[in-house]
Image (cartoon, helix red, strand yellow):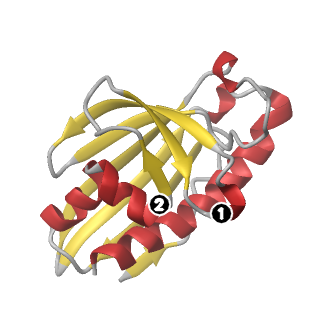
Amino acid sequence: MTTDAGTDHTTDRIERSIDIQAPRARVWRALADAAQFGAWFGVSFDGPFTPGARLTGTLTDPDWAHVSFAVVVERIEPESLFTYRWHPFAVEPGVDYEQEPMTLVEFQLDEVPGGTRLTVVESGFDGIPPERRGIAFRMNDQGWAEQVRRVAAYVT
């Protein structure tokens, strides 16, 4: 397993890639099945991932169990691309994030020698209100670095 610890240094987009020593079909199931996604991401969803679905996720870590969030599934292209929208770093109790635009999260799979390259891109941070943009970008940048390692560990 190798990681590209680099980030696209813009204010609008985070990109992380990891080469995973597992077949693309296995990595795909870990992404596109809501229960498997939840197992490595640390979230419980209230339904399956289907295009157009609006799901609520609740974090499973006891310290963060008060955090729930919405995802809107956009695209599911089997063993290739899975995308959804969400409100980044929407963790403050009592704050109505629904008035903000959502960022787009894309999971792209490509075959590489010995396995699968997973690339995660989250874009749209420039649309987040300025008072939240910096912290949302910083926290999600750190979060995606951890999450690509988690999915790799989950499938291998």
Amino acid under label 1? Pro
| Callout 2: SS | helix
Q: Position of residue 7 (x, y in %)?
A: 58, 59
Amino acid under label 2? Phe
**Cα–Cα span, label 2 and label 1:** 14 Å
Q: Is residue 41 above or below residue 122?
A: below
Q: Position of residue 105 (x, y in %)?
A: 45, 41
Quarter holding residue 115: bottom left
Q: Is residue 139 above or below residue 49?
A: below
* Residue at 63 percent of width and 52 percent of height: 140
Residue 41 badge: 2
Quadrant position of the N terminus in the picture: bottom left
Q: Position of residue 102 (x, y in %)?
A: 57, 27
Q: Is residue 89 above or below residue 16?
A: above
71 on left or right of 89: left
Instruction: Name the residue nearer the viewer: 103 or 156.
Output: 156
* Residue at 55 percent of width and 46 percent of height: 58
Please report whichever mark, 2 or 1, sits nearer to the chain's N-terminal start.
Answer: 2
* Residue at 82 percent of width and 29 percent of height: 130
Residue that sits furthest to the top in the current view: 99
Q: Are marks 2 and 1 in contact (CB under 8 Å)?
A: no
Residue 62 badge: 1
